[in-house]
Amino acid sequence: MFASQGNMENLVNIRLLLVSVAALVLLSAGNAINDYCDYNIDRINRPRRPLPSGRIRRTDALIFAIILTVIGIWLGTLINRNAIGFAILVSIALVSYAFWLKRTPFVGNLVVSGLTGLTFIAGGVAIDSVQGTLIPAIFAFLFTTAREIVKDLEDTEGDLKNNAKTLATLNPRIAVRTAIGFMASVILFSPIPYLFGWYSWHYLIAVLIGVDLVLIGLAIRLCQDASRESCASIQRWMKWDIFVGLGAIYLGF
């Protein structure tokens, strides 16, 4: 019996390790192909990045992305059937986003935030139990949607020159309000896991101080100043603050 339990634990740990590596590989592939597609935009918005600066050739980035995608799907075959389908679905979504959906107002933002949330659900898929992954997935989805819109506000100049239609290029005021709305949704959602008894008070204290107060300050700043420089600073703060949120979830168990 004990040997059987030990084997089961080892299997779970191996699957979690494999799905973590697969997620890292596929998201890296997505970043590479996104940089390939955004070459002209990044020449304006982020000229120091590897591709627009000439340190890496565009063709090499595309080949790198293809290799990583194949590796990510192959890793899925080592986990279970659901993981294979999951890996293929994520790969299709990443390619669709880079080539087409990114230039579709608001839809591109939802795709990125959805993929971020699915990263957590992938762990549940690997061990055939997704229930415990839903809270961090929802948290990541709401938080990332807000950050992606702020990021679009930062990138407005390059997007306009390359005819990339985002919520920020079509109507900056609506983009600001939408970003603030999703920040507010994170704040409203944050106490729910505690109120329903899913997470402990450690989570509540950490999320209120480390996430909610920070988001309130960033929302006020965004409302007052939606310039490129301000949005760049806000989205960087949000990038790091999401790790605080994940830390709060970890403390809540």
Image: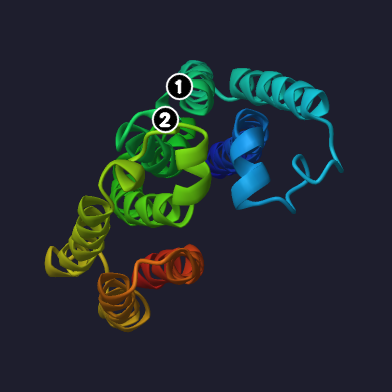
The residue under label 2 is: 103
Q: Would residue 207 be seen by someone viewing this image from the given angle?
A: no
Tell me the quarter of the picture where residue 202 sits. Answer: bottom left
Location of mark 1 (residue): 100
- Are the residues tagged 1 and 2 within 8 Å (C-beta)? yes
Q: Quadrant of residue 217?
A: bottom left
Q: Residue at x 62, y 47 (%)?
A: 44
Q: Residue at coordinates 35% horizontally, 29% vertically from top-left? A: 104
**Distance of mark 1 from mark 2, alpha carbons?**
6 Å
Q: Given the image, on which type of amino acid does mark 1 rest?
A: Trp
Numbered disc 1: secondary structure = loop
Q: Residue furthest left?
A: 195
Q: Is residue 4 left or right of residue 253?
A: right
Residue 150: give x, y in percent of width and height.
38, 57
Query: Which residue is most to the front?
Result: 161
The residue under the point 73% across, 49% down is 49
